[in-house]
Image (cartoon, coloured by chain):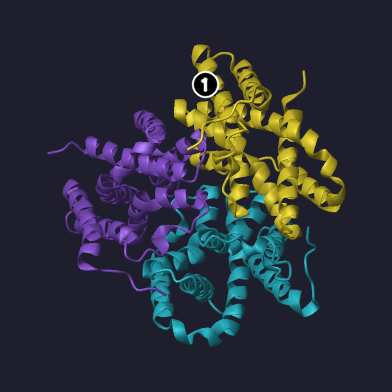
Chain colours: A cyan, B yellow, C purple
Amino acid sequence: MIPIDILVWTGVLTFAAMGAMAAIERRFDLLGVVVLASVTAVGGGSLRDVVVGQLPPAIFRDERLLWGVLGTALAVFVLRHRLKRLRRPIYWLDTLGLGLFAALGAERGLDAGLGFWGTIFAGAVSGVGGGVLRDVLTGEVPGILYRNRDLYATAATAGAATVFALHRLDPSHMTLAVAAGAIVAIVTRIAGPVLGLRLPRG
Amino acid sequence: MIPIDILVWTGVLTFAAMGAMAAIERRFDLLGVVVLASVTAVGGGSLRDVVVGQLPPAIFRDERLLWGVLGTALAVFVLRHRLKRLRRPIYWLDTLGLGLFAALGAERGLDAGLGFWGTIFAGAVSGVGGGVLRDVLTGEVPGILYRNRDLYATAATAGAATVFALHRLDPSHMTLAVAAGAIVAIVTRIAGPVLGLRLPRG
Amino acid sequence: MIPIDILVWTGVLTFAAMGAMAAIERRFDLLGVVVLASVTAVGGGSLRDVVVGQLPPAIFRDERLLWGVLGTALAVFVLRHRLKRLRRPIYWLDTLGLGLFAALGAERGLDAGLGFWGTIFAGAVSGVGGGVLRDVLTGEVPGILYRNRDLYATAATAGAATVFALHRLDPSHMTLAVAAGAIVAIVTRIAGPVLGLRLPRG
């Protein structure tokens, strides 16, 4: 069994690398690369904690992850010309992070006593909130709102709903509910392009 | 007397419909329509609760309104080609929601012990904050900052200031102060175009 | 010795004037000028208080500063055609405010029990957060992310790190640590163009 900490680190650092790459594409300076990596990596969970009222956000209680984010941003900056071949593995690691944070975020929502929509919000924001903040800071309309072939926020929502439903059925097996929620989110995202699914558009 | 709950529901669902329409105009996908409807409908009150420190936001304590928002977003999405004739009634319902939420938001600010500016902030953000968040997410400069012929945020500010002043004069009649504040906001917005009022520009 | 209150007022009102000028350049209306002045002046410290969990934000506890912000916004609006010669003094006053708020924000982070990164966040957001919110509301990518010749956020970060380090060395001299942090931030920003320093770019 892979310890949960390794999965969390993998997800956070992947999000950080994607934020750093987005900053480099836009020719931000080194500080902008570090800021965008941090916002993408920990902005979603922090936004969740701010709205749920668990302050200061969890990320500030154990700062080792933030050192990892800084190291990742610097590494991506230095190696920026050699990273194009990483697009494919990053897609998979990003999907892992999405599912994991959606499920863990839903758990935090349930811990805070939230109901169905509150839990969906907590899970979805944990999974996609960092990317939304990144898009807003780079002057773009958040991709989750219109990229109907990439079931990204849909996957996070499905994962969080799974955690809520399983916890409602049997509150004593939260770990199982979280694992199932993460898997539902990951499978939903992967199944989208495989099955040619897409959301209808306005 | 119309019960307050019916007015709140009317205002929230009107804001949700306007958010859904804005998303459809931009060809967002179905998830984007639901997200933008939710942000427009409940983002202002939630932002107020986050800043005032009443967490989690009130909207998560009784989730029936959020089911109404979801239903509204789906209905607008399905009926999107037949809604153009609704522009006129929506203007009036939006004005009702603006006045109502500005006054109720000011009341929440007073409850939290805020002073004059805090109360203005709480009222104005409750009335216009959802629209501002919607504009930011759709990549637009918030209309309240420059549309000087539409006294929208001005009306919310006037309504909140009215609640503050009447509450200061006589703290025992809060309901009356809220009703008067809502009416002042509604009249201010309606009076703008009728009297040809407009704010000076930079 | 200049009392700290005079410095804080100078910094806040300078930020307010810069926000008002940015609004006027974009031809916002009078309400937009007041809103953008307020967001620029007090948005950074308020965002810090929201994330750190000290709610409602300090700015609402003593509202005299907000009256000063309103007065500044109105004065800038009325005198808008005569303010071009003020660019130079505003640069210096802005640098003062940046250093001061970065150092005072770091102090607030330490008071809230944050560690290194939390203190950096609290200080940097206090110094540059209002400008970032102003940029987002005016539809621009925040300048701190890419203007690599203006060591603005870098200076705030250096100042906050200085406060953290000196406080760690000797917790009994917080005032000295804050003063040193402010000076480090101010010197960093001034030294940038003088020495031709710039951050590397992606």
Give the percent coordinates (x, y) of residue A198: 78, 69
Tell me how many marks there are: 1
Image quarter of residue B62: top right
SS category of the residue bearing label 1: helix
Determine the residue positioned at 37% across, 31% down: C75
In the image shown, does B111 or C189 lie closer to the viewer?
C189
In the image shown, does B14 or A126 lie closer to the viewer?
B14
Going by the image, does B98 lie left or right of B106? right
Give the percent coordinates (x, y) of residue C130: 41, 48
Give the percent coordinates (x, y) of residue B176: 63, 16
Q: Is residue A59 above or below residue C57?
A: below
**Can residue B60 be seen?**
no
Q: Residue furthest front?
A: C81
Determine the residue positioned at 74% across, 49% down: B20
Label 1: how many Cα within 10 Å (few below 14, some 14–19, many 20+): many
Tag 1 residue: B164
Image quarter of residue C184: bottom left
Give the percent coordinates (x, y) of residue C118: 36, 57
Q: Is residue C139 above or below residue C17?
A: below
- Callout 1, which amino acid? Phe
Going by the image, does B198 lie left or right of C149? right
Q: Residue furthest left?
A: C1
Going by the image, does A153 lie left or right of C98? right
**Can residue B39 be seen?**
yes
Determine the residue positioned at 35% across, 32% down: C65
Pick the quarter of the image with the C terminus of chain A. bottom right
- Marked residue chain, label 1: B
Pick the quarter of the image with the N terminus of chain A. bottom right
Image quarter of residue B94: top right
Determine the residue positioned at 68% across, 69% down: A185
In the image shown, does C27 or A110 lie closer to the viewer?
C27
Q: Is residue A156 above or below residue B183?
A: below
